[in-house]
Amino acid sequence: MKTEVTPRLKGIKRVAEDLGVSIWTLRQWAYTGKISSHKLGNRLMISPEEIDRIVRESERPRLAGSK
């Protein structure tokens, strides 16, 4: 019986575009261990959970009294 696998990992080109950083920045973060990544063949892939973590950890708090 075949099971269908839904691709969840995203290529770094798409992630770079979504996050507004260069692919070289993402590669550097991956190779230095700042972010988790997956190497599939010659492609570097990033999980949606890791993308969410990157966004969550880069959030700056709103200043008191700001509208």
Image (cartoon, rainbow, N blue to C red):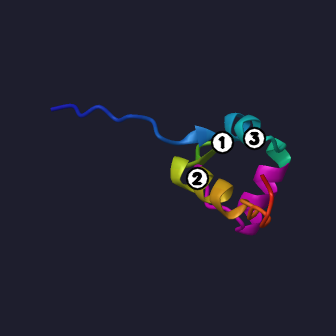
**Label 3 is placed on what type of residue?**
Ala
Q: CA distance from mark 3 to mark 2?
A: 13 Å
What is the x, y in percent for residue 23? 80, 43
Q: Is residue 30 magenta?
A: yes
What is the x, y in percent for residue 26? 76, 51
Label 3, on which residue?
16
Q: CA distance from mark 1 to mark 3?
A: 17 Å
State if disc 2 and disc 3 touch (CB < 8 Å): no
**15 on left or right of 53:** right
* One can see residue 38 in this view: no
Label tally:
3
Label 2, on which residue?
52
Rendered image quadrant of residue 19: top right
Q: Which residues are magenta?
A: 25-39
Q: Secondary structure at mark 3?
A: helix
Q: Upstream in the sequence, badge 2 or badge 1?
A: 1
Q: Which mark is residue 42?
A: 1
Q: Give the mark toward the camera: 3 or 2.
A: 2
**Label 2 is placed on what type of residue?**
Asp
